[in-house]
Image (tube, rainbow, N blue to C red):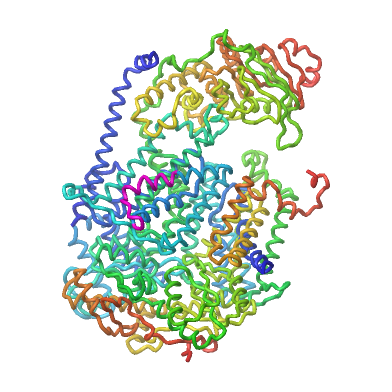
Amino acid sequence: MLLQAVVTGLSVGAIYGLVAMGFAVVFYVTRVINFATGQLLMVAVMIIAGLAQSGLSPWLGIPLGLLASALGAVVIYFVAVRPVLYFDRLSLAWLVSTLGMAIILASTAALIWGTSSLAFPTLLNGKDVQFLGAALSWQQILSVIVAVVLTIAIEAFRTRTLVGKLGMAISEDSDTASAMGVNVTRYAVCAFALGGLLAGIAGVLVGPISFANPYLGDTYGIYGFVALMIGGIERPAASMGGGLILGVLVSIASTYINPLAADWFPFVVVIAVLLVTPNGIFRSGALLKRLLSTRPMAPAAQGS
Amino acid sequence: MNKAIFIRPTKAIAVPVALITLIAGCSSGSSSSASAGSSAAAATSAAAVTSGAAATSGAAATSGAAATSGTAATSAAATTGTAATAAASSSAAAPTGAPIVIGAIAGTTGAYGSTGQAVINGTQMAVDKVNATGGVLGRPLKLMWGNDAASATTSSLLFKKFASAGAVAMLGSPDTATTTVTLANSMKLPDLGAIDDGGPAIYPDGPAKPPAPWAWSNSLNTYAWGQIVGEYANKNCPAGLAVLHDPTFYGLGGLAGIQEAYKTPLKINAAISEDWSSGGTNSLDSEINAIKKSGATCVEVWLTPQDEAAFVNQAHSLGAKFTVLGNDETSADDTFAKLAGANADGVLSAELTAAYQPNATVQAFAAAYKTKFNVDTTPFAELSYDAVFMLAQAIKAGNSTSPTSIQTQLNKISNYDGLSGSLTFTPQQHVTINAAQLTLVKYDVASKSWKPAS
Amino acid sequence: MAAATAVKVTIPQQPGHRRGRGAAWIGALVVYVVATLMLAHSSNYHQGLLLVAASFAMLALSLDLVAGMTGMYSLGHAGLFAIGAYGTTILQSKEGWSIFAALPVVALAAGLIGLVVGTLSLRVSGLYFAITTLIFTIIVNVLLSNLTITGGYQGLPSPPFPEFPAGLSSLGTALVWAVSACLLVTVAVIWSIRASAFYPVLLAIRDSEPFAATSGVRTNLTRVLIFSLSSALAGLAGWAFAFQGFITPGQFDSTASINILVMVILGGINTRLGPIVGAAFISLFPVIVSIDPLWQEILFGAIFVAVIVFLPEGFIGLLARIGRMARGRWWPASLVTADPGPVPDRLAARHLPAGERPAVALQAQEIRFSYGGGVLALDGVDLTVATGTIHGLIGPNGSGKSTMVNLLSGLLKPQSGSITINGQRAEHLAVWQRADLGVMRTFQSAVMVKELTTRANVGIGLYSRIGRLGTRSLAWPLIPSAHRDAQAMSATSAGALRTVGLSSRWQSSRVADIPHGVEQLTQLAAACVSGPSLLILDEPLAGLSSDEVDEVATVLRTLRDAGVTTIVIEHQTRFIFDVCDNVTVLAAGELVRSGTAAEVRNDPRVREVYLGQ
């Protein structure tokens, strides 16, 4: 029962976590929260579903959908974010302009495909597997695998490569970075594209379960945002952790309390934890970093 | 009259208070919106949409003139608007005289926007038809409509907007029924048509107590659907019934109907909060596993078509074999069947007999609807169409557009032969659809259609 | 008494000017009342628009108080709004209360809940403040959706609003008057705070908490109280919104909370009219604009983007731009403010008579401190500063100088050791309490509020000398003593700027527009303005020209002659040995040498560790 709740929660949380990472990689480089991230998930979902409806194989549709999400994110950067950063890097004006893009994306999709949900290619959904008495579909297992692989890849890229480290430098002081000859715009474009791509991947994973609706971005945008808040915004991997925690808490609440408890139980837990560790769940303990760290820990580090 | 007093002095004192200016601005907008609304109502195809938008910007530009010259100007604009639509469908004598304004409120955007669109489309068809055949009391009907986007705030403002523009009755809303019914009662203005999915909004104190005095629902009645599936479960579910239901009136009405017919304790009775506005589905894995454990073989899924489809798909993935029972939305359009695909096979639901076995009138309506809007008709379009005609009949019978006269006459309509069936209102009965008008159906994936279940 | 006369003498034109402004405000009030009267006779629809727009305007104004002015991006305001709306409806329909009795109760309840939420949320900062307050909204929403008394997901019908008695029926709809009055009260409170001398203090808390704290502001308490006030106003907005027809949980969800923030930013954050304009636009656009709904939504989103891209300061940025252009063209003179006159006596530097002062102004003993429990940044350091001297604190980078001054000013607390200031034990005192002891300091980095003038920034330094700024800010324009204090603060700040050698042309410049050197001198003025007994300067010379360095030296000597004790951290050793009476040298968290300037300069160990010889 508990195992079932946890594995189900992890599979849902992986989706939230991917959306949260979509938020986080953008924030990491540009200090902007792209509130249209949920809608970028929707863009991939709608394009794949729309193409499948007109007979295209999903294996062709998926790359096109992911491409559309990434391109959409770049468009958002140039239209709604760059002019704002140019004016004042620290203002919150991007909150409004990215929300505006979110509204435009959802309503445009509704104009094109109508407001009702479309069917989404089944992919691996519908094939179940028993795992120590817990039942899961292959699609859910795929979600967890993809989430773990992407998290490790992004963390390794961020901390091990020069380009990733430069991204960190830009986030801390873009003026100095740009004075040192770093092309800040190029980094920002890449961050937005990667953020869109992550949201699109989340869309491909969740599409067979949630179907394709133009307004889907609202739901996953909010969940991704909450996951981001739980995990902490400073590190992409931590935001994935936030997603997994949220997913598991939702699943445990609906299994052990009642389905409506999924609406409040995770938040009560989160607020309790935040009040104990005011700097975010993964900030003080750096728990996830230890869990996900690819290098063996030095004994000295363990001691401290 | 109040409005005319209001507009001029506000313009005279000019700009100092920004808020006031804004409100003055909207007062001139409201008189033009009627024509914009009705021309945009037809907008489903992209081409129609752009023309609708163009019409509005034109109207907005001239709205200042319309507002100052008052009622005469507005009525003239409305008459030409309706005459144009009437000419398109028929050549009967165009009604003259001041138009009778009716308001319609429905959520036409959001994941359930298709329901609201059907409501507006059906209403528009009926208004066109009435105007093409001489109007009501020799006067044309004029439709003002708005999208409440399922927001109680917007719904309330739209209700007041249409009422202030002289609407004699309101239609809807399928999304914010509690708001429209409350305002109808407090402003003593009839509200009918697609009001929620019947049931609790009309009978807040239960079906045995008096209904809301100013609201009459033509809408699909969750209570009646609940009774039908409850009766089925009584006979066919010896291992017990589990119910997953939406926590709003939609699900609660269905649950009440089920428990009316199915007296055995439910194996599982769980409320699931749903995402109506974004169409996101819940992960129902925990519930599926709980139902498997409970031993129940029948599951009543009183959720949105999306969630219901997600349920059957996920149950299939997890190897659960349930007899799944649906609700009034399951077979109302093809959303559920499309999303669930092969897993929809064998799902039971109930349908309006009138829609399921259409007579010539219904078939003709369906064809005209398809031609006009390029989508298939749904029960929501048909019942909204009926509501306009029942309203017209009540106005004719009382020879008056006063709200009290309409109230009295609506309560006397008996066996109106509408698209959604034979419809009756009495002072106690304010809901047209009952269990006797429904047929139990079962989805057959081979023919991709709903077949009689028994 | 003397101060009051001084003020009157120096500003002869002021009363007439003020009378003119007062007449303008009364005129605006008359227009407001007339507009209310007309709306009270208008259609149900227009009254509905007013009710919704005004409720959201109040809500947005209350959010701007915390987000715009104090830097707390609350996403809890939809929940607080709900408490007002649901509280009123439930008290009326279930408990039979009069709605007028419910008004103070729901406002107070929202204020108290805000106090608790604020206290808990302020344990975390920045983005986590946003999440804890967002979770508050989510939890309120879940309660509203699931409790029976709130009507569950369906919600509750609005309570009826009583009409005027027959004699007053010519006034029209009573509800319009009530809502109009609520909006007026909210606007009055918020605008009063904006006009008060407390406003710069709030901005300092927002932008530069250490500056505010060392000026004597209890920053956390102020934040919590401001959040509580904002919550009460949000509750008041909820009271008005309760009469809008029907209330459902969906109107008070997390999206609604984000929407309120959007209203504030779109209209213009931290402006008088911005939140009102933004609220009216967002709440009324969907009802007023009748085009095809999907195109309407696209237009709505496009306006968001366009406004922010072309007017990053929001709708009101356009008005402000036009206003600045108009002022520049027609009233250029108003940019140059008249000199506010000499420093009033009661704000002049206060010093105990020489005989009553302890000979040692500051004594720190055995100070130990480490960041996060790691390596000791200070290891048993002693520091003794004699009253009325200039004491230099020098050492290489990482020697612990800045840590030391942060410990002395209270921004950090030592792990062990004692600090005595003017004879009082101080190591456990909070920052603001040390300001009351007469300790003032400057910072290496730029800490001034960029959007305020230098004079307004210096005025923040007077916080500890002016009583009850926060309370009086709620009705600032109506309080005679507030006018006197504002005038006195202005004159004293101007005097302090003159003292540090800044000509009067800088006094009305915004800090954002001035060179770094001038900003450093402004900091010095802000630290001196309250007449401190112990002044701590952290690298005051950074970015100064040689003329300005000489100016600072003169200022320090003048202050010393007036009896002020000064501690200076500085890298320019020539300045230190030239100006300071005594010098203490730190290296790697330990004391190297303390003594007179001459002694220290000639100590071979000092030359070794610090002068690199």
Residue C583 in the image: above or below residue A168? above
| Residue A66 appears in view | no
Please give the name of the residue rendered at 60% of the width and 73% of the height, measured from the top-left corner.
B290
For the N terminus of chain C, give its image quadrant.
top left
Percent position (x, y) of residue B110? 45, 66
Please give the name of the residue rendered at 38% of the width and 66% of the height, measured from the top-left corner.
B176
Residue A259 magenta-drawn? no
Please give the name of the residue rendered at 22% of the width and 72% of the height, measured from the top-left corner.
B406
Residue segment shown in magenta: C93-111
For the C terminus of chain C, give its image quadrant.
top right
Pick whichever, B367 or C229, lies toward us: C229
Left or right for C472, reference B385: right
Residue C107 magenta-drawn? yes
Question: Residue B74's quadrant in the figure?
Answer: bottom left
Q: How many marks?
A: 0
Question: Residue C523's quadrant in the figure?
Answer: top right
Residue C371 in the image: above or below residue B273? above
Pick whichever, C144 or A119, lies toward us: C144
Residue C42 in the image: above or below residue A66? above
Question: Residue C339's quadrant in the figure?
Answer: top left
Percent position (x, y) of residue C100? 31, 48
Residue B139 in the image: above or below residue C136? below
